[in-house]
Amino acid sequence: MIASLSPSSLSLGIDIGGTFTDLVILDPADGRASIWKESTTPDDPSRGAIAGLEQLLPRSGIQAGSIGRVVHATTLFTNALIERKGAATGLLTTAGFADVLEIARERKYELYDVFLEMPKPLVPRPWRREAKERLAPDGSIEVPLDVEAALAEVADLVAQGVTSLAICFLHAYANPVHERMAAEVIAKRFPQLSISLSCDIAPEIREYPRAVTTVANAYVRPIAETYLDTLEAALKRAGIPGGLFLMLSNGGLTHVAEAKRAPVQLLESGPAAGALAGAWFGRHAGLERVLAFDMGGTTAKLALVDDGEPLVAWGFEAARTKRFLRGSGLPVQIATVELIEIGAGGGSIARPSDLGTLHVGPESAGAQPGPVCYGRGGTEPTVTDSDLALGYLNPDFFLGGTMRIDPGPAVAALEGLSTRLGLEAGRGAPGIHDVVNENMAGAARVAIAERGRVPRDYALLATGGAAPVHAWNVGTKLGVSRVVCPPGAGAGSTIGMLMAPARIDRVASRNEALATARWNEIAAIFEALEAEALAIVDGTGADLSRRSVRRLADMRYVGQGSEITVALPEELEAKGVLAAFELAYRQLFGRTPPGANVQFVALRLSISAPMPGAGETLRIGSGQAGAEALKGRRRVHFPDTGAIETPVYDRYALIPGVQLEGPAVFEENESTFVVGPGARISVLPDGSILAERVA
């Protein structure tokens, strides 16, 4: 348990991305934030984090001993799944079900592709073993567990080098007795073996996603334990006394022990923080509906924020073989901020396609060697090289002038690409910019429509190092009239983490018709879920007196193959629950089928509570507000006008209430906001820059 965490203690946020590691120190008393971006060190991500900390502390004049907590998000575990670099993992499952991971859903995500590549199971066939046991769907025991036979299978796995074991028995969500019995005897016989149980990780129906989620947890758990132990030790050596908290995919924080137990919950932690930042800045800018657009060095993602809160989904696909195709990845049943991967990042490489057209991403130059302009050995042009050549970026003020980028090699690489594509000189850079923007706008347009929304009802809020450069032109393609760039946008995900509450989500299967629901039993299940979640949230030191508790249910019409998640009314009774379900159903599908019966599939509970040290304000700036804001002018390329002389402003010198007109470029240390012609620009009270299209 984390105790005695003072609300006035400084907070350190660390977000490790594919290209840069962002660090932010926040003083919750006055909202003052200090930011540093350090190149990510893929061989040991904690090394880059500590190197960045060693730069940030002296520059900000902050002592390590004054940091009361550290909040962290990382893509390490997602990358382990994508690159298949997890632990040697075995699976123990019910007799007859060893091939569930291979059979999957028996669906082809591209119907006519005869060379279709399906996602490979995380556990190879020889390491998938069967146990003699069987439960009925209601949890009753049909075949008792043969403990000795199960131990013999596990002993053989351990002898072959397996270090982590997933146990996923049929219908264990209804009765965990066999899984817990097996885990107890296996742990006693093989204490060095890491064990993950489906009844703990994914107690839900559907064997394939339940098995995948449990296996994914087992696959990354040893890595998580080693990594978090290493990071904690490094932070202690750096003199930081505060505890370490981890960002979860659901947009909340948890303590290290919970992260080590179920690291599968962290797979989308970094992108979730970007969505939280979009929601937080949107609320402070007075915007209720926001498209949180987060574009970093590797990927671009979008999250819909309605009424100040990002949408939450109860599952996502990891490690897709085709990045933008649904069904090509591994289904993971966890609560996650609903993130839509819509495109590439600043480091994404541009190349001719097999058809001779321009193709951008998904391969990224990453931190090493990085874009050509970094001068670290990169030879293929990237989105960042294009942005530099178009005048969007200042080579003398990249990362506030701490990192020099060279336009010469970037332009040469872009011209080489133009030649290979058969384009006239100078067309490579605007081509890359337009292709990547069109790809993002197209993917966003489809994703927004699938959720029953219309882009023009939202403001596009840009975070990440690359999003402010692209947001105006992406917004133009989407038909969005308002684009917002908050202060510190380049480290937006890290800021979002520091403002995040503690949050825990729990689920229990409940297959029951609404008409015959036993409400006392349902209430008892919610009470048990709440008690379990409260124990974990309490361990973070969050303010439980201000906690928020949400009860939800997965529901569907009888006979349907999929369900929707519905927020339940405070009073659990048939009429009110039916009304909530039908309202949610109509919002998604337009109408409800007459006379159809409704059933529960699962019950969900979400608890969140504010963290001490989170703060309610943000103050960023290395310059002096009210000083001369105009830094100069440079030629900047815009799609409709070509290259034109454009004023360049010091973001830190702008004060709330300032009114400007586009085109304009706003520079701050971590990002650059580019606004095209025909825009009305204003600085909002919270320091965000709002650019509105003038009809």
Image (cartoon, rainbow, N blue to C red):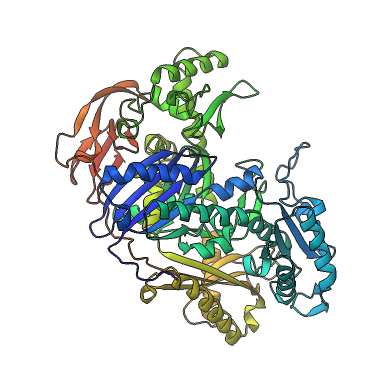
Q: Is residue 97 visible?
A: no
Of residues 482 and 131, the one nearer the viewer is 131
Residue 363 lies left or right of residue 117; in this view the side is left
Q: Residue at x 44, y 15 (%)?
A: 426
Q: Residue at x 48, y 20 (%)?
A: 428
Q: Residue 657: give x, y in percent of width and height.
A: 18, 46
> Which residue of the protein is positioned furthest toward the front in this rendering?
237
Q: Residue at x 48, y 75 (%)?
A: 534
Residue 93 lies left or right of residue 488; in this view the side is right
> Which residue of the protein is positioned furthest toward the bottom in this rendering?
520
Q: Residue 507: give x, y in percent of width and height.
A: 59, 70
- State whether residue 115 is above or below residue 450: above
Mark count: 0
Q: Examine the image and state in which quarter residue 177 appears.
A: bottom right
Of residues 643 and 381, the one nearer the viewer is 381
Q: Is residue 86 visible?
A: yes
Quadrant assignment for the C terminus: top left
Q: Residue 652: give x, y in percent of width and height.
A: 23, 40
Q: Examine the image and state in which quarter residue 668 appears.
A: top left
Q: Residue 173: give x, y in percent of width and height.
A: 68, 72
Residue 541 lies left or right of residue 519; in this view the side is left
Quadrant assignment for the N terminus: bottom left
Residue 695 lies left or right of residue 632; in this view the side is right
Of residues 310 and 73, the one nearer the viewer is 73
- State whether residue 667 is above or below residue 507: above
